Amino acid sequence: MNRILKLFLISAAVSSFLTFPLHAQSSVSETSGEEGQILHNYEAGDIRFSEDTLFSHHGERHYITAATGMFVPTVVLSLWNRYASGSGWAKVDYARNFNRIKNGTVKWEWDTDWYWTNFVLHPYQGQLSYSAFRTANFSQFESILAATFGSFVWETMCENNTPSLNDMVYTSLGAWPMGEMLHRLSFEADEAWGPLRFLITPMRIWNEGITGDRPYGTHGNIKELSFYTGFGAANGVNDAADYEKADEVYPLFASLGLNVVYGDSFYHDSNDPFSAFNLSIGGSLGKGCGEGYRALEKDLMHNLYIFSDGWVLSRSVAESDGRDTTVGLIFDYDFLWHSFMNFSTLAPGFAVKQRFTGEKAKVEWELHLDAVVLGTHDVWYYRRGIIDSDRIYKAYNYSVGGEAVAAVRYKFHDGPAFVLNDHFYAFYDFKDAKHEVEPGVSVFNYLRGEVTFPVSEEIDLGAENILYSAYSVFDEYPDIASLMYSAGFFVRYNLK
């Protein structure tokens, strides 16, 4: 632990040194807010932030507030699980765990926890540590280190379970896109309705409550913001040799979702990660298909998803009248937890985005080619109880591989819009100690198409179609082919 703490402090010092000239030139004026606090919230495109990088920060760092804030969620969650919920895994012997760290005898494994916990709640827990530093005026790089250190402390000191490798990755690296997107959206909330910033980034309560100071950032960056509500139905089939073909019908479900376009991803020249990003989050709930490893799973259909991408480094190239082109490094964080399938990715890569604007319509297209640092994909044999196992939450493989994203949007000015968005994945499912199914290869595709018709400036009516197809090859079990089709209608409310 001492080595990790030293590394964190040294890295923070290096980051401060690297960015000192920028900050010396970027002293900003301060204005008082309605609550008497100092506001550091500037208009989008402010020159003070134009040269930001992964190592940039603005204003005075609050070291003690950030360091203590990093441990507040850890302590609260640990005490709650230990004393309020009485969870056995939280009743730890702190001295024994610390000695394991000191003696270098900590053993790590790939865990079997609930899907939502591992790949959404852990990134969210990590972003709390990330936000503790980010909202205390630290850089993105320093905040990533804080999330990594906080994850290490949680895994090695706050659980009786064997420390988890997958949690370490998703709580640290996954905290970066989630934490930075929420951090930037909290500045937009400052302008819309101040208290909303605390719901978006709860650690601002800690930092602002202690220091009376707000972090530095910009507002006015949201280009599109919309909510949608709708309904639909789906039908899927799984086909494996030696097993009866399994049809699954989801007759009716209701859906809610949120879409955010932050910054102009098609005309963007920046070294500042996530200064332009797209975020789509939502879910569905409805009648189950009658299949599953639990009664609730059989009766209730669920679908929760997060699709996001943000520029890490981008360059605007080949500009001309009516055409914008941007290329660079991008980071995709995907998560989908559906009754029929699930998958998740942390995937950095290369992308190109181009926009053509004409007299009657606008066309936007993009292509991402990513390397999946760590991903997951469902295993039908577990998910449908074909293989007996008391590890009922472990319905997925851990994977590495590649991801390709292709999307096109054709929108008439003040008219209908057509969208196709395709995510293709190729995974190698690697072996871990708690897998009964030997590793294999999975290729799968998630294609979504929609058409919308405006009925007013604020409201669109639309229809969507989703086609999911997958093929998985295993060493000791029959290969599996899966196909699901979903269709629905929705109303979209355009707030911006």
Image (cartoon, helix red, strand yellow):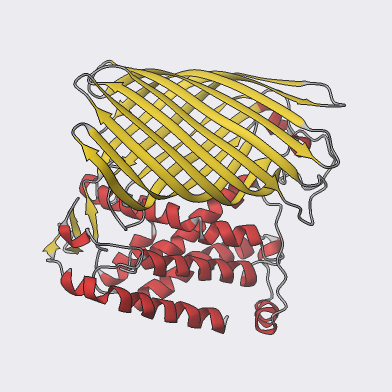
Relative to 68, say whether 494 is above or below. Answer: above
Identify which residue is drawn at 52% across, 71% down. Answer: 149
Instruction: Say which quarter of the image contains residue 18.
Output: bottom left
Residue 146 % position (x, y): 46, 69
Judging depth in this view, the residue of 466 and 129 nearest the camera is 466
Judging depth in this view, the residue of 106 and 296 nearest the camera is 106
Quadrant in the picture for the N terminus: bottom right
Relative to 127, say whether 56 is above or below. Answer: below
Judging depth in this view, the residue of 272 and 66 nearest the camera is 272
Identify which residue is drawn at 52% across, 49% down. Answer: 347
Q: Is residue 333 left or right of residue 66?
A: right
Q: How many marks?
A: 0
Residue 177 % position (x, y): 43, 53
Q: Is residue 87 left or right of residue 495?
A: right
Q: Is residue 84 visible?
A: no
Relative to 105, say whether 439 is above or below. Answer: above
Q: Is residue 248 visible?
A: yes
Instruction: Say which quarter of the image contains residue 12.
Output: bottom left
Residue 438 % position (x, y): 81, 46
Q: Is residue 266 left or right of residue 429?
A: left
Q: Is residue 486 left or right of residue 260?
A: right
Quadrant in the picture for the C terminus: top left
Residue 385 % position (x, y): 80, 35
Judging depth in this view, the residue of 294 and 125 nearest the camera is 125
